[in-house]
Image (cartoon, rainbow, N blue to C red):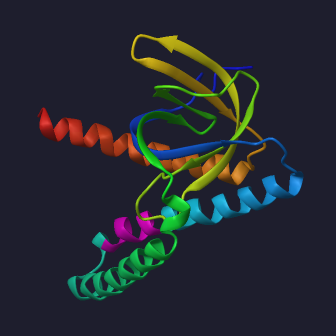
Amino acid sequence: MLDPFDGVLDCHGEFPIAWEVACVYTDYDCSVANHRNERLLGLLHSLEDVRKDSYDETYESNANLARVEAKLDLLLDLVSELLTTESADLKPCSLRLSSRGAEWMGESTDLQPSQQVWLSLGLDPKLPRPLKLLAEVVNVFREPGGLRMLLAFKLQSELVTDLLEKAIFRYHRRQIASQKSVNP
């Protein structure tokens, strides 16, 4: 299996995650997960585009847009609270993420190479629920700090891959900007 970080942009950060073994999954399960992930990543993309574009307009338009945006944020917060049971099992984790895979350190795991898992990933707090990505365990490395799990995403649609790449690029760009502001 190829390295899911070879030749693609990745980012590092604290993300809430959970995983479960995918003993049996169907094409329908993958299709539903892809469709759901496309909607979530599309929502994230459009929310970020609206915020970026709003700065180029007049003050009055910005004020109106800010009010609508505040209402939308409130609505997303309320919906997120309703869906907290889905995110309750997610635990914050230092994660390396690319559009093709994920890597993190853990204390113990039952994961084995070649095993299929569903990875739930809280990519952004603005999203009402986590992404659900089918992945294959590439390897589990024993290291002094624990176990390092390396997963490669599987059967993900081109649109999910594209939107995930854009989200990772934006996250990576914000990381660089925050580092520059700390160390001018």
Residue drawn at 59 percent across, 54 percent down: 131
Horizontal placement of 17 versus 23: left or right?
Answer: left
Query: Relative to 150, does residue 16 appear above or below in the rendering?
Result: below
Observer-nearest of 70 and 48: 70
| Quadrant of the rendering where the C terminus is positioned | top left
Q: Where are the magenta residues, as a range?
A: 47-54
Residue drawn at 42 percent across, 48 percent down: 170
Label count reads 0
- Residue 52 included in the magenta stretch of the image: yes
* Magenta: main secondary structure: helix
- Residue 19 included in the magenta stretch of the image: no
Observer-nearest of 109 and 11: 109
Query: Relative to 115, does residue 53 appear above or below in the rendering?
Result: below
| Quadrant of the rendering where the N terminus is positioned | top right
Horizontal placement of 124 versus 23: left or right?
Answer: left
Residue drawn at 50 percent across, 45 percent down: 17
Res 49 seen here: yes
| Residue 85 rendering spot, x and y as whole percentages | 52, 66
| Residue 49 rendering spot, x and y as whole percentages | 44, 65
Observer-nearest of 34 and 184: 34
Query: Quadrant location of residue 95?
Result: top left
Q: Outermost residue, right direction?
A: 27
Residue drawn at 30 percent across, 89 percent down: 64
| Residue 118 rendering spot, x and y as whole percentages | 68, 45
Query: Quadrant location of residue 38?
Result: bottom right
Res 128 seen here: no
| Residue 171 rendering spot, x and y as whole percentages | 40, 46
